[in-house]
Amino acid sequence: MMITINEFELPDIDSGPYGITAGNDGALWFTQHKANQIGRMTVNSEVTHFAVPTPDASVLSIISTFQGDVWFTENKANKIGKLKATTGEIIEYVLPCPDSAPFGIAEGHNGDMWFTEMNGNRIGRILPSGEMIEYDLPNPGSFPSFIAAGPDDAIWFTENQSNQIGRITISGDVTNYLLPTKDSCPVGITSGPDNALWFAEINGNKIGRITPTGTISEFTIPTENARPHAIVTGPDRALWFTEWGSNQIGRITMKGEMTEYLIPTQNAEPHGIVLGPDGAIWFAEECNKIGRLSLL
């Protein structure tokens, strides 16, 4: 497979792009935790910025909903943000417990917004009415990280410190699955094209797969200390993931075959990754760039 990687420098110096999502408006939306703003980039690399009302909120993960709104986590501000893409208005929802450190966010099957609380050791949920519900996790200090809607009407999430993959139902019932690799520290997770969940093991240097019934497979990344972070399903029925340790973008097929592609900028620190509206793979680079990987 032939690929091309292009990178686009952001106008604000050292803005700290982290999470990225594809909007219903045909643009890419991304968080900039150092600049405290949400960015919007067209596929032609035109950029617009939206300031987050709370200072030093540390905006991290971001998701675009089926309705077109953009939601994001404010890790330090203890809030969940909602940006109306049509107007640019930002609404913030304060979490009930202080210092919960919200991190991952995903849209549920019925339009609810689900998020993780790293310090709070909880899974949170915001109803369309704005009501917030929280569910305590059974293992203390599990450090829930990324979160995704599964193929089974449940929500799945990674538990970075307890080395588990979690599953929570709409009624709040939690099931945990211990990973075979010790201290693998799972982070990114996504629903794959094969009705399974795929996830990145940042310390285990592996990509994992778990079925809705809890069967786990692991695949070792060829490059040592790759430190895989975020993962997404591509246009080719493969999974694509960022490797901020080795400065690469990785690809794994349904059969577990891996390929890695070097990012042109050294020490780019790629984090969030998404399938763009143009069929390319887009990713956020901590070095103040947005990357685009096109398949030829």
Image (cartoon, rainbow, N blue to C red):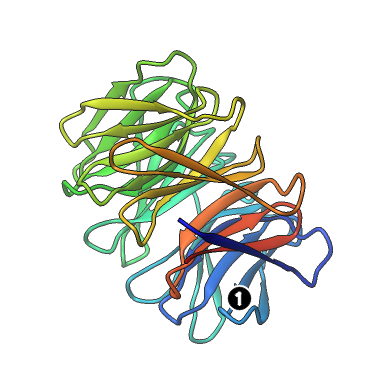
Residue 130 visible (yes or no): yes
x, y (%) of residue 290? 65, 63
Label 1: how many Cα within 10 Å (few below 14, some 14–19, many 20+): some
Residue depicted at x 20% and y 46%: 195
Residue depicted at x 40% and y 78%: 24
Residue closest to the eye, 64 or 184: 184
Residue 79 visible (yes or no): no
Image: 202 above or below 78: above
Q: Which residue is mark 1?
A: 41
Residue closest to the eye, 194 or 132: 194
x, y (%) of residue 167? 27, 35
**Residue projecting furthest to the top:** 182
Residue depicted at x 60% and y 25%: 224
The kind of residue tagged 1 is: Met
**Residue projecting furthest to the front:** 1
**Left or right relative to 86: residue 157:** left
Image: 109 above or below 196: below
How many labels sit on residues? Answer: 1
**Which element carries disc 1, helix, strand or loop?**
strand
x, y (%) of residue 47? 67, 78
x, y (%) of residue 6? 65, 66
Residue depicted at x 34% and y 40%: 198
Residue closest to the eye, 66 or 93: 66
**Left or right relative to 225: residue 83:** left
Residue 165: image quadrant is top left
Residue 65: image quadrant is bottom left
Which quarter of the rendered picture does the N terminus lie within?
Answer: bottom left
**Residue projecting furthest to the bottom:** 87
